[in-house]
Amino acid sequence: MDDDGTRKFNVVSGGINTREILSAVYEALRVKGYNPVNQIVGYILSEDPTYITNYDNARSMICKLDRDELLQELVASYLADS
C-alpha cells in the first residue's frame, strides 16, 4: 500500500497529568525554600534536572514530562487565561 498522505498520531500520556505534576513540583520547590517559577524555567530552558529538588520525588516526576509538550501546555494555558 503506497500512501504519501500525512498521518497524525495521538500519543496517550499513560495517565500522566501535566498540571498535577507541575503543581506537585511547584509545591516541593516552595516547601524547600526555592523560587519555584525560576527553578522550573531554568529546568525547561536547560533540561538540567538539578534545577528541581529531589524532595517529595519532584525531580523524578518532572522528568516524566516531555519539555516540548510542557511548553505547549503552558503557552496554551496562558493564552486561554488572557
Image: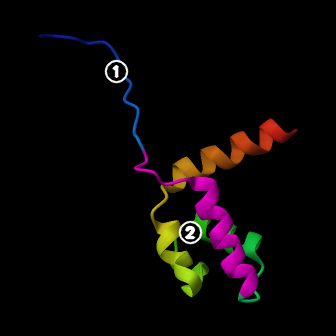
Q: Where is residue 48 shown, x and y percent of the image? A: 52, 75
Task: Return the residue nearer the eye: 34 or 14.
Answer: 14
Say which residue appears at 45% left-offset and 63% top-offset. Answer: 64
Mark 2 surroundings within 10 Å by alpha-carbon count, few (fewer than 14), some (14 through 19), many (20 or more): few
* Kind of residue sitting beneath label 1: Arg
* Kind of residue sitting beneath label 2: Ser
Asked if residue 51 is positioned above or below residue 37 in the image, the reply reads below
- Residue 22 highlighted magenta (yes or no): yes
Say which residue appears at 78% left-offset and 79% top-offset. Answer: 35
In the image, 20: left or right of 31? Answer: left
Say which residue appears at 55% left-offset and 53% top-offset. Answer: 17
Mark 1 surroundings within 10 Å by alpha-carbon count, few (fewer than 14), some (14 through 19), many (20 or more): few
Label 1 vs label 2: CA separation? 31 Å
In the image, 65: left or right of 7? Answer: right
Of the numbered discs in the image, which one, if any, rests on residue 7?
1
Asked if residue 70 is positioned above or below residue 9 in the image, the reply reads below
Q: Which quarter of the rendered picture does the C terminus lie within?
A: top right
Q: Main secondary structure of the magenta part?
A: helix
Number of numbered labels in the structure image: 2
Label 1: state its secondary structure.
loop
In the image, 19: left or right of 36? Answer: left
Q: Which residue is mark 2?
A: 46
Query: For the magenta stretch, what is the residue range?
Result: 13-31
Label 2: state its secondary structure.
helix
Asked if residue 34 is positioned above or below residue 37 in the image, the reply reads below
Of the numbered discs in the image, which one, if any, rests on residue 40?
none
- Residue 47 highlighted magenta (yes or no): no
Q: Where is residue 71 shown, x and y percent of the image? A: 62, 50
